[in-house]
Image (cartoon, rainbow, N blue to C red):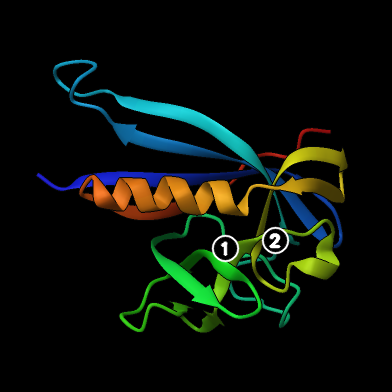
Amino acid sequence: MEKIFLILIERYHYTAQTSLGRMSFLYDNILVTNPPQPIKQYFGNTLEDTCRPGNIKVYGETALPGGLECLVSLYEDAHYGKTIIFHTESDKDTIIIPPLKWTTCLTHGGQTHKDTAGCVIVAANIIDMDTIQGSLKAELRKVVEEKIADGYTIKARFVNLPQLS
């Protein structure tokens, strides 16, 4: 039986430039109950570009579509350091949701929509509805590394919840 560790990104506040959400982990733990029941563990806050209808993308200013479930892999480069990347394709870099395509969608630190460019900022604190602070990138990478070592396949699911006034 494949063990899945799901990074759940639930967006709940939308502005013209951003989508604010929460990141949680969802996984089965066979040691807790039999049969296994999913455990949902809150991790942090997310800030992304604005959500748009499924057939519209403005380069660098559009969040990944709600309803997307994709794979997650480890990623490292000189600019972002060690982080994670979301992908649907075997190149471990590309997300294709016909007719649209995204590349190199990472999680990393930042504070506003100017830092997103299609990526997911993950942080501890909400400053206001368009700003978060206190990067959790390194902590997220560590959790993902540990779950991979424990034999989990890592996936992500993006959910657009209703706007909370």
Q: Please provide percent x and percent y for residue 11.
A: 65, 45
Q: Nearer the viewer, residue 150 or 54?
A: 150
Q: What element does badge 2 sit on? A: loop
Q: Nearer the viewer, residue 151 or 18?
A: 151
**Where on the picture, by quarter, is residue 91?**
bottom left
Amino acid type assigned to the residue bearing label 1 in the image: Pro
The residue depicted at 64 percent of the width and 47 percent of the height is 136
Q: Determine which of the numbered discs, if any, sits on residue 123 in the image.
A: none
* Mark toward the start of the polypeptide (1 vs 2): 2
Instruction: From the image, tell me which residue sits under label 1.
Output: 65
The residue depicted at 74 percent of the width and 67 percent of the height is 116
Farthest right residue in view:
128
Asked whether, in this view, residue 26 is left or right of residue 10, the answer is left
Can the viewer see residue 158? no
Q: Please provide percent x and percent y for residue 151.
A: 20, 49
Q: Quadrant for the N terminus, please.
A: top left
Q: Please provide percent x and percent y for residue 14.
A: 79, 50
Q: How much space separates mark 1 and mark 2, taking CA atoms?
A: 7 Å
Q: Are marks 1 and 2 in contact (CB under 8 Å)?
A: yes
**Where on the picture, by quarter, is residue 107?**
bottom right
Q: Quadrant for the C terminus, please.
A: top right
Q: Residues within 10 Å of mark 1 (few under 14, many from 20)?
A: many
Instruction: From the image, tell me which residue sits under label 2.
Output: 51
Amino acid type assigned to the residue bearing label 2 in the image: Cys
